[in-house]
Amino acid sequence: MKGYSITLFGRTPTLVLTLTLALAFSGTGCVPKTAPEISAPMQIIFETDMGNDVDDALALDMLYKYVEAGKIDLVAIMTNKASDYSAAYIDLMNTWYGHPEIPIGILRDGAFGDDANNYAKAVAIMQDNSGAPLWPRTVQDVTTLPDAHTLYRRLLADRPDGSVTGLRARGDYEVNMSWAGGRITSAEITGKRGGTISVRAAGNVQDITLEPGKVTRLTF
């Protein structure tokens, strides 16, 4: 999808940032106590490292409540934890809360898969007295779930105009972007440590120097 991604090249591994829809929550993010008044539900993709603790589960619980209050549309949930139990736990939450239709994407070479055993696995493998899974599920085989980047692209294909804020890139970059007519139009990049990076967007590559903690604005 030309125009829908921005690639940062620095001293850290390359990361292709694919746009979410309106707001990206990090795995440790929180939903405000009082949501702003909006005329239409805000579209959300929840990016999570669900698995090693309960914090992301509580964040997802709050998102479901915002869905039910009509404040957001939870478009998809992406797990960057390299563990089948992470996806399985998200699926059982979707099912338990009555939202089995929310799609799940997986980063199959994600981070720290083994620590999902600390929480997600313990819940996912629970059984009732008959030996059946204690928690009902919609997805019986999580290996059939799509890659996260594939799901992102499919979801965005029908949204030619929009913006995203709060994306986090490896190397401690924060990126906001806007696009129109299927092409990126502007971006804001903040690097905690600063430094020089190459930005590839809309078919062009340019080198930019970031000052630590300051926003650099780009137009395309």
Image (cartoon, helix red, strand yellow):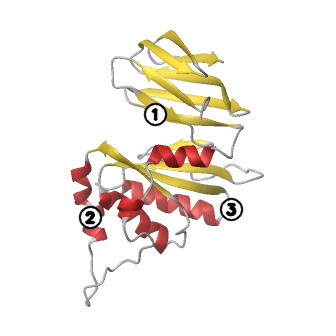
Kindly identify which residue carries mark 2: 121
Tell me how far mark 1 sits from mark 3, CA to CA.
Answer: 27 Å
- Element type where label 1 sits in the image: strand
Kindly identify which residue carries mark 1: 168
Q: Nearer the viewer, mark 2 or mark 3?
A: 2
Q: Nearer the viewer, mark 1 or mark 3?
A: 1
Q: Are marks 1 and 3 in contact (CB under 8 Å)?
A: no
Residue 50 vs 189, above or below: the answer is below
**Residue at figure coordinates x 33%, y 17% from the top left:** 11
- Element type where label 2 sits in the image: helix
What type is the residue that disc 1 sits on? Arg
Kindly identify which residue carries mark 3: 70
What type is the residue that disc 3 sits on? Gly
Residue 204 rendering spot, x and y as whole percentages: 57, 15
**Residue at figure coordinates x 60%, y 36% from the top left:** 164
Tell me how far mark 2 sits from mark 1, CA to CA.
Answer: 26 Å
Horizontal relation, residue 126 to residue 69: left or right:
left
